[in-house]
Structure formats: C-alpha cells, structure tokens
Amino acid sequence: MNDAPLYQGYDQAGLDAQYNNRARVPEHADIHAGYQAQADAVLADFDARLDVSYGPSAEETLDIYLPKPAPPASAKEGAPTGGMPINVFLHGGYWFSRHKNDYRFLARGMIPSGAALIVVNYALVPSVDLDEVVRQCRAAIAWTYRNAVDFGGDPNRLFVSGHSAGGHLTAMMMATEWPAFAGGLPADLIKGGCAISGIYDLEPIRLTFMQETLGFTPEQVARNSPIGLTPTTPAPPAPMIVAAGGDESEEFLRQSETFTAQWAKEGVPCEMMVRPGFNHFTILGEFADPESGLTRAVRKQMGLG
C-alpha cells in the first residue's frame, strides 16, 4: 500500500476519504429519500413545467417551478418585463450521478419569496466529458435568458446556484464570457451566484478513486477549475455566496475558503457562509427552507428582502 503524501499531505486513502461524502455520511440515502418524498407535494403546490428541452440531446432538459397561479408572460419581447427574478439550480453528484428530478423539493425555498426556480438536467460523465457538461449548463442558462418572458420571469434578474458538483458548475457559469459563448447574450447575464459545498480545484478529484469513472485529463482540470479562472462579469462584478456545512470534510472547507479568498482578491464580492451542524447532504435542506439563513442570504442577493 502506498502511504506517501499525494496531495495537501494526504496519502491515497486519506484523500479518498476527504472526498467520499457518502462514506462520510452513511445515512445519505435516507436524507435523499426524505427530500424526494416531498416531490408530489411540490408538484401539487406549484406550477411545474417539466422536461422542457434546452438542447438537442435527451438529457438536456430543465424543470420550471412557478407560483400558482403562474404569472402572465410578457407581451412584448425586449420590453421591461416586471417579471420574477429567476434562480437556476445546477445539481450535484460528482458529475456522474443524480438527475434534476431528485431536486424538486428545492422549490419550497425559492417560490414563496416570489422567484422562479429552474432545475437543470445535464448528461453525465462518462457518457460525455466534463467540457460537455459545462457546455450544456451554459446552454441551459442561455435558454433561460432567452425564454424568461414566456414564463413570467425577468431575464435581467437571473441568478445561478448549485450544490457539490453543481457548486463547481455555478462558479464555472460565473466565469463564463457570455457574448463569446453565443450571440446576443450580455456580459452581465448572471447577476449573482450561490455555490453550496462546491469543488473549485479539480486536481484532487483527479487523484481520487473517482478518477476511474471521471477520466479527467490535466487539460480538463486546468480549463474547468474555477480557482484558476478570472470572473468575467463587468464592473461591478456579480456577488457570490460560497456556502458549506460545518460538518463537511476538511478538504471541502479548505476548497471553499481558498476559492472565496481568491475570487475576493479578483474583486468579486464573496460571502462565505459556514452553516454549523450541517453536513454535505443536509445543507440542501437549508436551501429548501424559505426561512433558513442561507435562503435569506440568497433572497437578499436577488433583491427579495
């Protein structure tokens, strides 16, 4: 057995343990089952427009959650909509697991405050590579901007959030040069972000047991590690909430702290929130609670008090 230091002083077993959240929280399946048990009530309580296509592949779909009754669509394209702010959520699962349907319960956190919630699905590694996952998420954001008025949303108040791998994807969206991605998109397309329990440096992931599934190349790691990217939103830069559970592993907390410091140095208004008593999975319950400290911070970022 090789017990030589591999990364940040960890040997192979130690580094694997730092990023193996399911082993760290043995009750993770029960936690997710509790979240999914809320799905039927969410579909009954809110206007849910499911499986909306945003791209050519079967996996490129999203769900739109709105209050009942749904707000009217704007009659004139390009006119001030007076519509709802929009929060686009990108799910986690280490880029190789989970589905948007697992996250319907999150509608309870956003909708009561007067926001629309979009939950994005994307193709999973290894059926596609990480570059394609990032591209699909960008395409979902672009679709939301272009179609917001059709569901009563305000394209000029678009925010992004995500958990775990979705926290990584949230940071990647914040670092996107939108006019270069597609024509007609403004540089300040995203007005703010909230990355929850995210991964911002992919190099340690490449060195763990998950590499057998993920197959990250050093070039992909460099292209897709937000810690090494410069936020692209024009001045003033869009604000960022970087949240983590107090019971996360030392590596997850280090990643959040290092990323927050680095982007703050680049001029991004970054707020780090460590939620005591929450682990990598239970912190999602905070985002689903309209009265939690995390949800209140996101509401404030979105201009909802």
Image: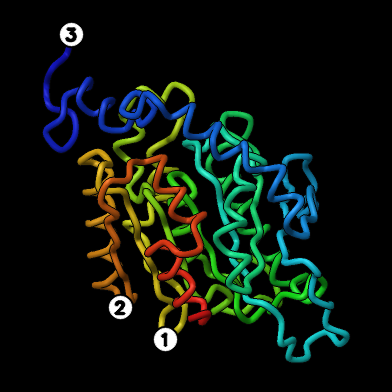
Percent position of residue 17, x then y: 26, 26
Q: In the figure, is residue 253 to the left or right of 243?
A: left
Dot 2, how many residues are within 10 Å of its Cα: few (below 14), some (14-19), or many (20+)?
some
Q: Secondary structure at mark 3?
A: loop
Dot 3, how many residues are within 10 Å of its Cα: few (below 14), some (14-19), or many (20+)?
few
Badge 3 is on which residue? 1
Q: Earlier in the sequence, mark 2 or mark 1?
A: 1
| Residue 229, quarter of the rendered image | bottom left
Counting labels gives: 3
Q: Looking at the picture, which amino acid does disc 1 mark?
A: Ala
Q: In the figure, is residue 275 to the left or right of 139?
A: left
Percent position of residue 294, x then y: 40, 62
Q: How far apart, in angstroms, are the residues tagged by discs 3 and 2? A: 44 Å
Q: Quadrant of the N terminus?
A: top left
Q: Is residue 129 visible?
A: yes
Who's the residue at 47% across and 34% down the image?
31
Dot 1, how many residues are within 10 Å of its Cα: few (below 14), some (14-19), or many (20+)?
few
Answer whether labels 2 and 1 touch (C-beta < 8 Å): yes
Q: How far apart, in angstroms, are the residues tagged by discs 2 and 1? A: 9 Å
Who's the residue at 23% across and 57% down the image?
257
- Compared with 277, 77 (above or below) is below
Who's the residue at 79% across and 50% down the image?
50
Q: How far apart, in angstroms, are the residues tagged by discs 1 and 3? A: 51 Å
**Residue 267: assigned label:** 2
Q: Looking at the picture, which amino acid does disc 2 mark?
A: Gly
| Residue 99, quarter of the rendered image | top right
Q: Looking at the picture, which amino acid does disc 3 mark?
A: Met
Q: In the figure, is residue 286 to the left or right of 108?
A: left
Specify the farthest residue to the right.
75
Badge 1 is on which residue? 235
